[in-house]
Amino acid sequence: MLGIPIGLMYANAGEWLIHKYILHDLGKNKKSFWSFHWHEHHRESRKNDHIDPGYNESPFRWNSQGKEGVALAALGIAHAPLFPVAPFFTGTVWYSIINYYRVHKKAHIDPEWAKEHLPWHFDHHMGPNQNMNWCVTKPWFDILMGTRAPFIGTRNKTEADRVQRELARSA
C-alpha cells in the first residue's frame, strides 16, 4: 500500500520533469516530435483564452491531443513490467496517467472549470510566464521546486509580474 503515495508523488514529479524538459525545452524546436506542445497546444490555448479546440476532436487524430495520448499510452506501457513487483505503485501510476489526460482535456474545454480546479495550470498557459507552473493535476512539485507562480486571483497583472520576478530571483 506504500506504493500509492509513492506513485502519486512519482507521477507528479514526472509531470513536472516531462513538461519542463521535454515538452518545453525539446518542444520549442519545430523539428522535434514534442513541438506539438509548444507550437500547437500553447498557441491555441493563448489564442482562445485557454481553450484548445483540438480537445473537441477525436483523440485518434494526429494533432496535439492525439500525440499527447500516444505519449501517455507509451508511459503506461513502459511501467507495465513493474506491476508484478509493485502493483500498488504501478496501478497508481496508471491511474495518474488516466487522470492527467482527463483533467487536462477538461481544463482546455472548460476554462472556468480550470480556473476553479486547476488554477496553476491555467496560470501556466495564461500567465505572463509560460515557463512556470509545470504541474497539471496537483501543484506539489511546482511548490517544491519553486516554480509555482500565481497569476489567477492576484489583484492584477502587476502583482503577478512581481511574484514572477521574486520567484526568478530565488531560483
Image: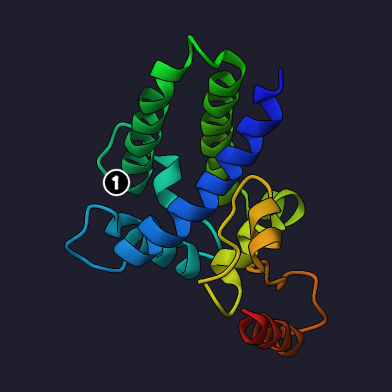
Between 4 and 114, the residue placed more toward the observer is 4
**Could you tell whether 16 is left or right of 44 in the image?**
right
Q: Residues within 10 Å of mark 1 (few under 14, many from 20)?
A: some
Between 87 and 134, the residue placed more toward the observer is 87
The residue sitting at 70% across, 52% down in the picture is 140
* Residue 79: quadrant of the picture: top left
The quarter of the rendered structure image containing the C terminus is bottom right
Q: How is the image coloured?
A: rainbow
Q: Farthest right residue?
A: 155
Residue 28 visible from this viewpoint: yes
The residue sitting at 40% across, 60% down in the picture is 21
Q: Secondary structure at mark 1?
A: loop
Q: Residue 2: image x %, image y %?
A: 71, 23
**Could you tell whether 44 is left or right of 142 in the image?**
left
Q: Residue 4: image x %, image y %?
A: 68, 25
The residue sitting at 30% across, 56% down in the picture is 36
Q: Farthest top residue?
A: 84
Q: Residue 152: image x %, image y %?
A: 73, 69
- Residue assigned mark 1: 63
Between 37 and 76, the residue placed more toward the observer is 76
The quarter of the rendered structure image containing the N terminus is top right
Between 81 and 24, the residue placed more toward the observer is 81
The residue sitting at 65% across, 88% down in the picture is 165
Q: Residue 145: image x %, image y %?
A: 64, 63
How many marks overall? 1
**Residue 88, relative to residue 44: is it above or below?**
above
Residue 27 visible from this viewpoint: no
**Could you tell whether 79 is left or right of 108 in the image?**
left
Q: Amino acid at mark 1?
A: Asn
Q: Farthest left residue?
A: 31
